[in-house]
């Protein structure tokens, strides 16, 4: 069977991992960082992803997309409150968010697909084979629309998504494999944009999820925002400056807030420096860990509610938890560790790299699915209740949250109005009483013969498969008339649209590759220029003046090409320079050899 | 036009029907199950064909106790149940059927879904008893709408107090008096729940002992019927009181 990779598609950072003879490993490309920042920028040379795109956050904030995961499977109304914080432009078309980048606009799955494609390319280069299948992780508390959006992103990137698995469960797989733990563990995952808590029982290779809970809109980003708001307020009062008119400065404030937060995980105080626009100089201040913790304490407290609910749902108390595992970059904050320690009454574990553990676990699950690992088995749950709308707009649950999947349920319903000729089956997901407060996943209609109210018997069957995909069947017990659908949650993108986006992604692929080539060529050219200039300074006196002149000419030709947009021209000028500098390199080698030989007898050298 | 959920307890007539068709179905299925769906050879193994090793569909009529290889008793050792659950999960889970035929994948999915429901039902003592009642007496969960006879007065009074509390100004002295009273009521009801649980435990024990003796006398049959009836009454009272307590807790919280 073809290799399946495991992918952690994070709000802030994404990673890809594979299974290497029973051990999951993170894939990193040629000396680059393994983590790919989940940032996509539109430059004059096309779309770029990851670390190079991150540089555009302040250079071109309106055309640089970050934290796109927050918008997956959402409508504009869902995220209305936070729109003001994002410098890029969001619009809505057909109930789906679109992000405007230059002339075009992209749906969140399309942006995510660009990140996935970057990971796919890296994995292909590293493993030397084509990669078409993946397991992708999502926050456990993602609803079906958000999961579907993630699957669509995979498809657009040319990946068959064999399984969507929950991030904390993935982490537990990596953790359990490493530590060979038995017992009950709590996985606390606080990333950039989402928070998850899962409670699992580990026993003889079985990973049984007992309960899961979380908040899909709570993470390190929110801490950054609070700190940034503090700075922005002070800049307003001290300098009379409203930075919201300067997207680049807004972005710089956010990034400096994040850096200060990260420094304060190690230090007790740190200096904050920000350049101001309009010749107003610099904003400087000291931020202490105490101040940071005061700002963030309410947000950290907010994670404890879901923890308590998960304990309650699994019918456990903190005493029953044997170990607490921390996942996600934001769990490096001392305040988070303290609060988690206090809640569970034990020191949390953080031996595994909290950035990598989710991708590693995804690789383990990928290996299970390809038949490689047979001694481990994950029994996951459905995070939210599923049901249908009944009389008075009330939701009737058929499958309760935290039910082990695969799961099925059957229930009998009837009509409310005399002579009713059809019933609407409106499928819902969520924990609220009223249908309108829950997520609508799909609806369909079953015909029934007109009869007095309460006479028809309609049997509704739910079946959730191991992927968490719901199938619903409704059957009129009298006529045998049956209707069934596979619920593809409607977050707005239709199948046709996803198809079209897949086609488009092939069209853009050419642009993407050339953008990538250009960036790499520029980086390589920069490195060559620096080393040649250094050699010239150190060894220019060893060669003829004409030769020095030739090198200088080649250097300025390369510098000019580097500022252009043609990667092939850059490569050609690099070759010219290397050719021109050949004599210099040889002369310098000779010279260093001579220096080492000086003062030594001939017999010593031979 | 929307649906209204109906909780219907089958009347005696339907109940009879269901039972007779039930046994017929079972016989047919037994026949179907005695042959492997794939190689048509005689089935001796439990869930896998001895000859072609293919997974076999678990019969829809197989009760949860039999599925776990347990006798129909109300006392179950949680460890035994869990061990069997993990063992069957390893046998059926779709993760291990990714590279198999569509037919096997469907069987794996249906078997796993059934197994998970069976485990959830048997793991919880109350759900287990309700399920056993359903098997033994064909009763579908009855939803009580009036208070149990021996609590009638108390509960009517409690409802009045709750109404009064809901209408009151929470900061007033009256509200705090009412709250104290409600807290006392809550303690009484919780005590009552504990008593019911103890009574249930006793009934469970009697049921298991009777089953162990396996007598077929007239007297044994009568005792059996009486235990089932008491169990059913207690279970529905218990649910009623539980709902009242939940409501109370939510109101004064
Ligand atoms: N040392 C640190 N102290 C505090 N926060 C940190 C630290 N390192 C990373 N973070 C925060 O962790 C978040 C990213 O975590 P990560 O697990 O990579 O997120 P995601 O899974 O959402 O991609 C960011 O908000 C980042 O600021
Ligand atoms: Mg993460």
Image (cartoon, coloured by chain):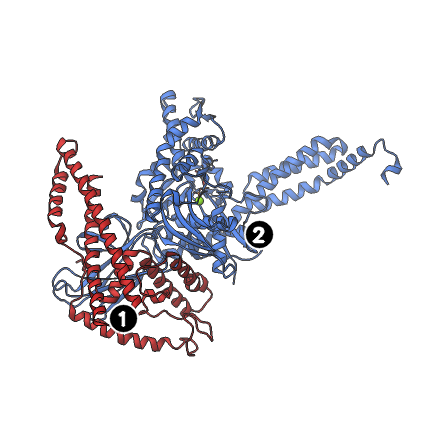
Residue tagged 1: B215
Image position of A151 (left or right of A549)? left
Q: Look at the image and tell me in which quarter the N terminus of chain B lies.
A: bottom left
What x and y, as percent, mark residue B229?
19, 62
> As rendered, which of A3 and B144 lies closer to the eye?
B144
Q: Which chain is red?
A: B
Residue tagged 2: A126
Report which colour depicts chain A. blue
The 10 Å Cα crowd at callout 1, few under 14, some 14 to 19, many 20 or more, is few
Image position of A590 (left or right of A41)? right
Q: Residue at x 75, y 30 (%)?
A: A541
What x and y, as percent, mark residue A277?
43, 26
**Vertical position of residue B107 compared to residue A442: above or below:** below
**Vertical position of residue B45 compared to residue A244: above or below:** below
What x and y, as percent, mark residue B219?
21, 69
The 10 Å Cα crowd at callout 2, few under 14, some 14 to 19, many 20 or more, is few
Q: Residue at x 64, y 35 (%)?
A: A530
Q: Look at the image and tell me in which quarter the C terminus of chain B lies.
A: top left
Of labels 1 and 2, the one closer to you: 1
Q: The numbered mark 2 sits on a residue in which chain?
A: A
> As rendered, which of A80 and A440 lies closer to the eye?
A440
The CA distance from mark 1 to mark 2 is: 71 Å
| Kind of element beneath mark 1 | loop
């Amino acid at each position: 069977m073809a290799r399946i990779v495991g992918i952690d598609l994070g709000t802030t950072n994404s990673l890809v991992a594979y299974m290497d003879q029973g051990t999951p490993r993170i894939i990193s490309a040629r000396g680059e960082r393994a983590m790919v920042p989940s940032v996509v920028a539109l430059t004059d040379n096309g779309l770029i992803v990851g670390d190079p795109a991150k540089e555009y956050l302040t250079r071109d904030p309106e055309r640089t997309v970050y934290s796109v995961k927050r918008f997956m499977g959402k409508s504009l109304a869902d995220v209305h409150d936070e729109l003001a914080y994002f410098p890029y432009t969001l619009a809505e078309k057909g109930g789906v968010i679109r992000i405007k980048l230059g002339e075009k606009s992209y749906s969140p799955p399309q942006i995510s697909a660009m990140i996935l494609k970057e990971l796919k390319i890296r994995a292909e280069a590293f493993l030397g084979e084509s990669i078409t299948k993946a397991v992708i992780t999502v926050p456990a508390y993602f609803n079906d629309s958000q999961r579907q959006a993630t699957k669509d992103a995979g498809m657009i990137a040319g990946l068959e998504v064999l399984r969507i698995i929950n991030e904390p469960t993935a982490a537990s797989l990596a953790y359990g494999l490493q530590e060979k733990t038995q017992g009950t563990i709590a996985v606390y995952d606080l990333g950039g944009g989402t928070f998850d808590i899962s409670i699992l029982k580990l026993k003889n290779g079985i990973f049984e999820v007992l309960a899961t809970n979380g908040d899909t809109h709570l993470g390190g980003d929110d801490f950054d925002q609070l700190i940034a708001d503090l700075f922005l307020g002070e800049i307003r009062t001290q300098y009379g400056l409203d930075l919201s008119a300067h997207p680049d400065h807004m972005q710089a404030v956010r990034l400096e807030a994040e850096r200060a937060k990260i420094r304060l995980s190690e230090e007790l105080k740190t200096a904050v420096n920000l350049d101001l626009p309009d010749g107003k100089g610099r904003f400087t201040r000291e931020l202490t860990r105490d101040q940071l913790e005061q700002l963030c304490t309410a947000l950290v407290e907010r994670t404890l509610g879901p923890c308590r609910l998960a304990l309650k749902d699994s019918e456990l108390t903190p005493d029953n938890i044997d170990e607490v595992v921390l996942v996600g970059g934001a769990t490096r904050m001392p305040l988070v560790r303290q609060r988690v320690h206090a809640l569970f009454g034990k020191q949390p574990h953080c031996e595994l790299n909290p950035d990598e553990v989710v991708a590693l676990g995804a690789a383990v699950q990928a290996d299970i699915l390809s038949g490689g690992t047979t001694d481990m088995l994950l029994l996951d749950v459905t995070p939210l209740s599923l049901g249908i709308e009944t009389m008075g707009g009330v939701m009737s649950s058929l499958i309760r949250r935290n039910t082990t999947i695969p799961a099925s349920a059957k229930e009998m319903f009837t009509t409310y109005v005399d002579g009713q000729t059809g019933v609407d089956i409106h499928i819902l997901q969520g924990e609220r009483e009223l249908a309108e407060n829950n997520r609508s996943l799909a609806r369909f209609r079953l015909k029934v013969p007109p009869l007095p109210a309460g006479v028809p018997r309609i049997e509704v069957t739910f079946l959730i498969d191991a992927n968490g995909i719901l199938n619903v069947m409704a059957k009129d017990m009298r006529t045998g008339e049956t209707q069934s659908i596979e619920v593809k949650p409607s977050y707005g993108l239709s199948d046709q649209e996803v198809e079209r986006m897949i086609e488009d992604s092939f069209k853009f692929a050419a642009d993407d590759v050339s953008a990538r080539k250009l960036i790499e060529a520029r980086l390589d050219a920069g490195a060559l220029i620096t080393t040649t200039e250094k050699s010239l300074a150190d060894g220019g006196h060893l060669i003829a003046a004409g030769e020095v002149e030739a090198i200088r000419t080649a250097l300025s030709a390369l510098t000019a090409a580097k500022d252009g947009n043609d990667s092939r021209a850059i490569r050609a000028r690099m070759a010219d320079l290397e050719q021109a500098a050949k004599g210099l390199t040889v002369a310098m080698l000779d010279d260093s050899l001579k220096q080492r030989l000086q003062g030594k007898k001939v017999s010593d050298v031979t | 036009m929307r649906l209204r959920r109906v909780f219907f307890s089958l009347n005696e007539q339907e109940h009879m029907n269901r039972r007779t068709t039930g046994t017929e179905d079972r016989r047919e299925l037994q026949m179907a199950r005695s042959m492997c769906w794939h190689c048509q050879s005689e089935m001796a193994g439990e869930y896998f064909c001895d000859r072609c090793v293919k997974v076999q569909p678990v019969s829809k009529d197989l009760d949860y106790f039999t599925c776990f290889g347990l006798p129909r008793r109300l006392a179950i050792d949680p460890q035994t149940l869990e061990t069997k659950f993990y063992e069957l999960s390893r046998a059926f889970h779709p993760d291990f059927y990714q590279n198999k035929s569509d037919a096997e994948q469907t069987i794996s999915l249906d078997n796993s879904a059934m197994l998970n429901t069976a485990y959830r039902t048997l793991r919880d003592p109350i759900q287990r008893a309700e399920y056993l009642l359903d098997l033994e007496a064909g009763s579908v969960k009855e939803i009580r709408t009036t208070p149990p006879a021996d609590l009638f007065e108390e509960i009517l009074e409690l409802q009045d107090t709750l109404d009064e509390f809901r209408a009151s100004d929470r900061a007033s002295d009256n509200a705090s008096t009412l709250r104290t009273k409600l807290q006392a009521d809550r303690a009484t009801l919780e005590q009552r729940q504990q008593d019911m649980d103890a009574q249930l435990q006793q009934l469970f024990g009697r049921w298991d002992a009777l089953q162990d003796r396996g007598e077929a006398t007239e007297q044994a049959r009568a005792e059996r019927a009486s235990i089932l009836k008491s169990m059913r009454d207690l279970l529905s009272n218990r649910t009623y009181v539980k709902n009242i307590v939940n409501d109370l807790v939510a109101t004064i919280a």
